[in-house]
Amino acid sequence: ASGYPFPIQYEIASGVDIKKLVVEPNKIMCLPPLIRTAQKFVKLGSRAIIAECGYFADFQREVASSVKIPVFMSSLLQVPLAQQLIAADRVVGILVANSTYLTDHHLESVGISLGSNYVIGGAMDDGRCIEFDHLWTQDLRTNPPAADYARAESEFLSVAVEFYRNYPEMGAMVLECTGFPPFARALQREINIPIFSWGTLMDYAYSVVVHREYYGHV
């Protein structure tokens, strides 16, 4: 929470885990606890709800319909915006943690038109980004969970830059995973294109519910 210049309230959606959310083909059991958690945020006085994992995209419409405050279930919500910011003959790179588990439903649920100007890459496909995986995969975690930041960043940059270079027409990149934003600035230094992430989603969500004051000559 200290990484952002605004107050954040965390809640755990009990009954939801990575296997149920990402791996299992039938994810419907995740919906009731997500709605309960969203409604709890409303009672706490939250102004917006932001889900952590990008694969929560599956439930964007359902959770948004369950409350009366804005809901941002996935960093993938930024893909349609990114597509409008670049030329029609360029593409948006969507870099997810593991492309195996990304479905058409994830994309359609956040307003992405299937077959439009995007390409998909998986940072952890084929066993890559091992150091990063130490924080996320149960069988690989240390106790307490720990990873070498510099090594994790180096592995991530290698994959992300390769993804960019594989598509010379890439005009922007959207990072799906919540764990990617700490490496986003280093990536942008390497490829020098707009980078969207969970971090930019957080900033945007705050900006629309707590609009800034204007100063000076207006």
Image (spheres, rainbow, N blue to C red):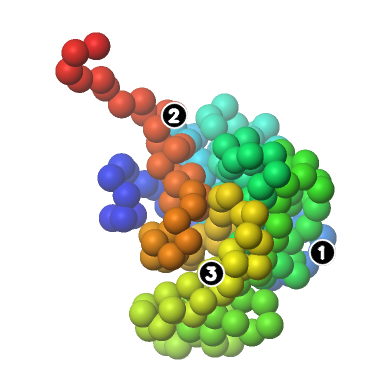
Badge number at residue 25: 1
Badge number at residue 115: none
Q: Residue furthest top?
A: 218
Residue 149: percent from the left, percent from the top?
37, 78
Circle 3 SS class: helix
Asked if residue 11 shows in the view, the reply is: no
Badge number at residue 161: 3
Calculate the distance from the C-alpha at mark 1 to the C-alpha at mark 2. 34 Å
Q: Left or right: 119 with respect to 191? A: right
Viewer-nearest of discs 1 and 3: 3
Using a 10 Å C-alpha cutoff, classify the residue at mark 2 as few (fewer than 14 neighbours), some (14 to 19) or many (20 or more): few
Q: Left or right: 218 with respect to 62? A: left
Sooner in the amino-acid sequence: mark 1 or mark 2:
1
Sooner in the amino-acid sequence: mark 3 or mark 2:
3
Q: Are marks 3 and 2 in contact (CB under 8 Å)?
A: no
Using a 10 Å C-alpha cutoff, classify the residue at mark 3 as few (fewer than 14 neighbours), some (14 to 19) or many (20 or more): some
Q: Left or right: 8 with respect to 156? A: left
Circle 1 SS class: loop
Viewer-nearest of discs 1 and 2: 2
For label 2, the residue is 208
